[in-house]
Amino acid sequence: MVKLIAIINKELLILWRDRVGLLILFVMPAVLVLVITLVQDNTQKLMGDRNWRICLVDEDQSGLGDYIADVLQSSSRIIVNHGNNREQAWEEVKSGEFQAEIIIFKGTLEKLRKGLRHKSRIILSGEKPEFSVPIAGTEIGILFEPSVGGGFRSAITGNVRLAVMGWETETLMREVVKKLFELRAQRVGEGAWVTPGIDMSLPDLSKIGVPLIQVVEQKQGIGLLMPTAVQQNVPAWAMFGIFFIVVPLAGSLLRERQNGTLARMLVLPVSYSVLLIGKLIAFGLVCLCQFGLIVALGRWLLPLMGTDPFVFGEQYLTISVVLISVICAATSYGVLLGSVAKSYEQALMFGPISVVIAAAIGGVMVPVYAMPPLMRELSNISPLGWGLKGFLKIFVQNAEINCVLAEALLLLGFAFFCLGLARLSLERQMRAGMA
């Protein structure tokens, strides 16, 4: 333990002497998270000024689809196109041709009429409605293009609900009038000329005013997480900064190899594993400080600039598991880079470029839900994509630890793979040097 603490202290002293490099490690991700979050947040707000295209698939052909289309198109910024196939319409939504798909399922009108007949009988009976009218068990589905913001979603869903309520009310009135004529004809046949009275003073009419058709935003099962700009960018750029630790870590190991420090330390009564663990812990502490800084910016500084605050949640154990896994993956990759690079220039070029590429395909720079299908598949091979997916499960879905085990195991597996290759490379170099 004394040897390990001494090695950690050595690494931290070396890092502290390079204050410019240390400052870059903290300032770069902080600036990126502020700039990118503000831009994306403003972009989501400005998206309300564009024209929106909606594909309506009316499988029921009952007239409800035309009614909804007329209500939506009363806004000059909404264009409704009719589609014949819900799967094809969803593909067009995912491609960005449409921003939403509305589905009226087959049998909607038939189920609605059964519920409305029940309502009309209660209204005309004059009985006190002691119970709620059973819902007809049908719904209208809405699917949104993944990058669509919450404001548009709420507006479209609300307008569709209003259209459905209006159409349902008109249909109910027709059912009531129809029932009135049937009762009148029945009473006339019985020799009575008085139409039965309608008790308009029924108490608690809200019990029979429950909409029979529910408007539900559906999930397509494509595995996309759709966070806000703040919830997306704070963990994304914090992790990006963590992975940039590969540059000073690789440089530290490379210098020790080139000036013979590593060889001299291995002669001492200290194992290679202790040397490596000490280096990983020292740089891991820097990564923890980076993450804390970015989270603090998202929690307290970004709201001062007009965004929502970053919500950290209460899944502290789950966050710790994913964070430690990310740090292990980043520091292990730095050790591998410092072991195989032949010069500081090689490490300085390959390290940042590889991290930027992994960040680009992993959803750090552009959210995964806004990527084309091919890029979404590529995000599954990026360590930054694994880490970001784990963080988004926590910060967006409040996931527990069992939900992020797959991402944590992938990151730890990547870490052990990098450390294994690094050890093989260093042992080969040491044997070559002794020979």
Image: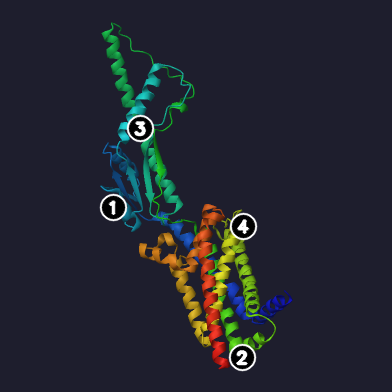
Residue located farthest toward the top when viewing the structure as drawn: 191
- Tell me the CA gap for discs 1 and 3: 29 Å
Q: CB atoms at circles 2 and 3 under 8 Å apart?
A: no
Q: Position of residue 52 (x, y in %)?
A: 35, 53
2 or 3: tag closer to the N-terminus: 3
> Which amino acid does the dot numbered 1 rest on?
Gln
Q: Quadrant of residue 416?
A: bottom right
Nearest to viewer (mark 2 / mark 3): 2
- Tell me the CA gap for discs 3 and 4: 49 Å
- Tell me the CA gap for discs 4 and 1: 42 Å
Nearest to viewer (mark 4 / mark 1): 4
Left or right: residue 287 compared with residue 347: right
Q: Quadrant of residue 295?
A: bottom right
- Tell me the CA gap for discs 2 and 3: 82 Å
Residue denoted by label 1 = 88
Residue denoted by label 4 = 317
Q: Nearer the viewer, residue 394 or 189?
A: 394
Element under disc 1 = helix
Q: Position of residue 41 (x, y in %)?
A: 49, 59
Residue denoted by label 3 = 168
